[in-house]
Image (tube, grey):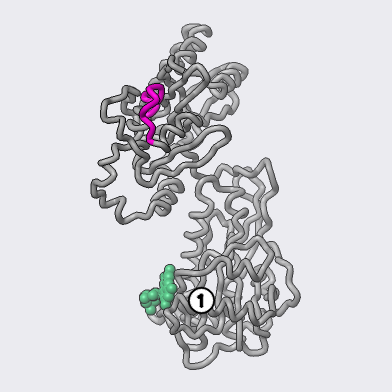
Amino acid sequence: MSEQVLRWRPQPPFVAEGSTILTHDAGTVLLHLDDPAAAEALLAAWDAGMTADEGEDWFLARGAAAMAEWLHLFDVLTHSGRLSPSIAGPDGTLVRLLRHPGDSGAYSGVPDPGDDALVLGTGVIVTRQADRWRLESPQGRAVADVDDNVMQAVVHADSSARVMSMPRALLREAGILVHAESTDRPDRSIDVWEPHDRYFHWRTRRGGNPYVVGATYPLRDRMPPLPVSDVPAHDLEFDIAAYASPEEEVLGMSVAEAMHARASTRQSPSPMTLGQLADFCVAHRVTSTRHMSHDVEYPQSRRLYPGGGASYEIDLILTTRGVGDLPAGVWWLDAERVVLCRLAGDLDHVEALFADAMVSTGGVGEIQVLVTYALRMGRNSWKYEGMAYRLALLDAGVLYGHAYLVAAALGIGICGLGNGDSAALARVTEAELVSVAEVMLTGAR
Ligand SMILES: Cc1cc2nc3c(=O)[nH]c(=O)nc-3n(C[C@H](O)[C@H](O)[C@H](O)COP(=O)(O)O)c2cc1C
């Protein structure tokens, strides 16, 4: 292991489309090769670990025109930070960096005397990926993939093995290892962000990380898309649409009036009627469905509120008590038919969900209907890579705004509940529904 080499590799992923090689994320065309077979061969070589030096030889062997393409490619790769250093030993790659966008500065891999005191930086996330470890730091310059030996040296802050000095130096330059004393330095941005929040933010938006974030349809080849609605197992149906008012009556209040009437209400003087709840359900219905999105077959729906990618991955679950003739229970709203499907009529379940919601109101809330926003993650993750859950949280916020205005217009008391227990819903339904947020309806205002 004594012979170590610092080398440079183009940073994946690359995809071939005809004779063009594109980067995934920015959609930048890096290179045109007239010969599609040559493009495929180049990709295969990249995947097999071709270095920049080997790339130059590859193009050189194809003549002057190809060499000009290479010089252009090298220039683009360098300035977009897409050439990344790796350290290889006789037994394979020890460290490989994926640079964050915008990081086009130099790496030397040269150890310095202070490297004896290097430790993992605050908030570095470590995950196992196939046969390597991935180290990610939102504050760093690059993501690092390291082998078991380097990982051991990192975790044990082991500076004794001289053979590790070059990998450790590179990880220091990448901002993944830091000098022990520097972790004490006050850093306001670190103080106000918990590590999981910072990582989630950094990882799920484009620009700061080397990952693909966007609509790439990552599960397209593995499974069909989930349908617009997927009715869970239920023991009773209740046709709540039959109790709804004619639409022109419901929409009698102007948006301006609804905005001014809107307020968080934690108790109500009287219960809401079944008609009011029916109107609330109608305001969350599917208005039409369609099957398309550019060239990909993907079932979508339209509703009275916007939804990221028209996925509408959030279903409404209503836990009810004392609403007219509607039996107390936990109901899934079939938004296509405006029918309630009962998941559980067990009153213990109902009470447990209400009790949990009460906690978020500091014990003062009087809840007639708990609305749980239940996520079908597959609706988003089939289409979106790197951002599926973030989108669901954005959509939950949209639903909040919609529900507040609708409740104001209908004279229903409503209050958001910022904290909920996901396990509570999981105890009620076997369906693959994950509760991500709740609002409570308190009665008539
Ligand atoms: C995302 C969100 C979460 C909330 N969480 C709670 C909560 O857990 N408990 C509560 O009593 N009120 C909660 N509220 C209500 C806010 O406290 C309320 O909107 C805020 O105090 C402003 O009052 P207003 O809505 O009457 O204008 C929440 C509101 C939002 C938008």
Residue 211 placed where, x, y %? 47, 39
Residue 221 placed where, x, y %? 67, 40
Q: Left or right: 51 with respect to 423?
A: left
Residue 373 placed where, x, y %? 55, 67
Q: Which one is nearer the viewer's eye here, 332 or 429?
A: 429
Disc 1: residue Cβ within 8 A of ligand 1's nearest atom: no
Q: Which one is nearer the viewer's eye here, 93 or 54?
A: 93
Q: Is residue 85 magenta?
A: no
Instruction: Please give the name of the residue rendered at 62% of the width and 79% of the height, measured from the top-left corner.
Output: 350
Crowd band around label 1 with a 10 angstrom C-alpha radius: few (<14), some (14–19), many (20+): many
Amino acid type shown at disc 1: Ala
Figure quadrant, ligand 1: bottom left
Instruction: Please give the name of the residue rendered at 55% of the width and 54% of the height, measured from the top-left corner.
Output: 309
Query: Which residue corresponds to mark 1?
Result: 357
Q: What segment carries the magenta color?
A: 157-168
Q: Examine the rendering and report whether any part of residue 89 can be seen.
A: yes
Query: Considering only vertical position in the picture, is 74 above or below 266?
Result: above
Query: Considering only vertical position in the picture, is 195 above or below 160?
Result: below
